Image (tube, grey):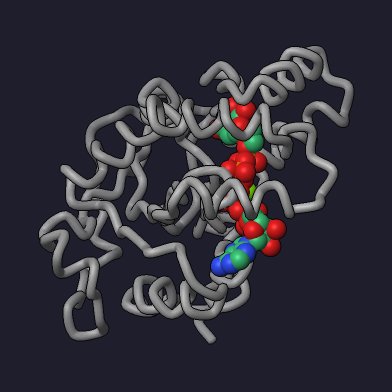
Amino acid sequence: MWRRVASVSHLTFAQKSIVNKDVCKLKFWEAFSTGIPRKEKGTFQRDKTPFITFVLGGPGSGKGTQCMKIVENFGFTHLSAGDILRREIASNSADGTMILDTIKEGKIVPSELTVKLIQKEMESSDNYKFLIDGFPRSEDNRIAFEQIIGAEPDIVLFFDCPEDEMMKRVLNRNQGRVDDNIDTIKKRLKVFSALNLPVVKYYLERGKLYKINAVGTVDEIYKQVYPLFAQFNFEQQV
Ligand SMILES: Nc1ncnc2c1ncn2[C@@H]1O[C@H](COP(=O)(O)OP(=O)(O)O)[C@@H](O)[C@H]1O
Ligand SMILES: O=c1ccn([C@@H]2O[C@H](COP(=O)(O)OP(=O)(O)O)[C@@H](O)[C@H]2O)c(=O)[nH]1
Ligand SMILES: [Mg+2]
């Protein structure tokens, strides 16, 4: 398994917060083997090392909306962990009822299950650029991803949004979701503070976190996001 280590970690958080094209001239394709043995299954045996972006933020902070724009401009494959879990419910799989109950309660689905579903999506994709949206939601999720996938994210986006704004957006989302109601959103916000913020802190301390002010119009927010990806000169960039 190839693990990317030539990450942005040599940049300070302040540099990353105001990143511009001159700041980062990264040799991003300098990856090397960590000595983790190649597995027959569950690894990426493609000629390109995967570029993994975790997209974090509370419920309604705009993760999915911004991911769609990143996909359009930079050719990423968007893997929304929530969408993957909802598809699992819809497929009537053995875990469907448990996942549905967990989502209704605003809790977090067992890590191994979520990671295996994400893994399946990554392995069936021909792309090497992944936006993993809404995951990891806890330290347990994060560790499970590292252990099962054997990789770490290259960068982590964090959409920082006040709770009242997130609540307003979720209650107006209108996608028929079982968890977009006042009771569940209150629980989700508590889970977010207790379990997801420690993950944000973890990546901040490792110099991988890009904090985005998630208040404003979609385009205003994307103006902060675009340069973070533009610096890497991806082939499909438009
Ligand atoms: N910047 C924004 N301002 C106002 N509403 C927004 C903004 N970004 C997204 N929305 C809306 O808020 C709701 C939640 O956005 P979404 O992208 O689904 O967030 P998340 O994936 O973080 O839960 C959606 O209805 C979306 O259209
Ligand atoms: O890795 C994940 C992602 C999502 N969820 C569950 O799915 C719900 C909806 O997640 P999604 O990312 O779709 O919500 P969003 O933040 O976009 O509103 C969460 O509240 C959790 O109950 C989970 O358990 N693990
Ligand atoms: Mg979402």
Q: Residue at x 31, y 43 (%)?
A: 3
Pick the front one: 210 or 118: 210
12 lies above or below 200: below
Judge whether residue 197 can be spotted in this image. Answer: yes
Image quadrant containing the N terminus: top left
Q: Would you say 146 lies left or right of 192 here?
A: left
Task: From the top left corner, tell me how far across and down residue 100 is, in percent.
Answer: 76, 22
Pick the front one: 72 or 57: 57
Q: Residue at x 83, y 19 (%)?
A: 93
Q: Would you say 177 lies left or right of 221 here?
A: right
Pick the front one: 126 or 12: 12
Judge whether residue 125 can be spotted in this image. Answer: no
Pick the front one: 23 or 161: 161
Task: From the top left corner, tell me how far across and down residue 61 is, in percent.
Answer: 52, 53
157 lies above or below 110: below
Report ligand 1 position as a quadrant. bottom right
Q: Residue at x 55, y 75 (%)?
A: 217
Q: Would you say 225 lies left or right of 111 here?
A: left
Task: From the top left corner, tell me how far across and down residue 186 is, in percent.
Answer: 57, 31
109 lies above or below 54: above
Image quadrant containing the C terminus: bottom right
* Residue 124 position by quadrant: top right
Q: Would you say 174 lies left or right of 22 here?
A: right
Task: From the top left corner, tell me how far across and down residue 126 is, in percent.
Answer: 62, 56
Q: Residue at x 50, y 38 (%)?
A: 135
Report the label total. 0
* Residue 219 position by quadrant: bottom right
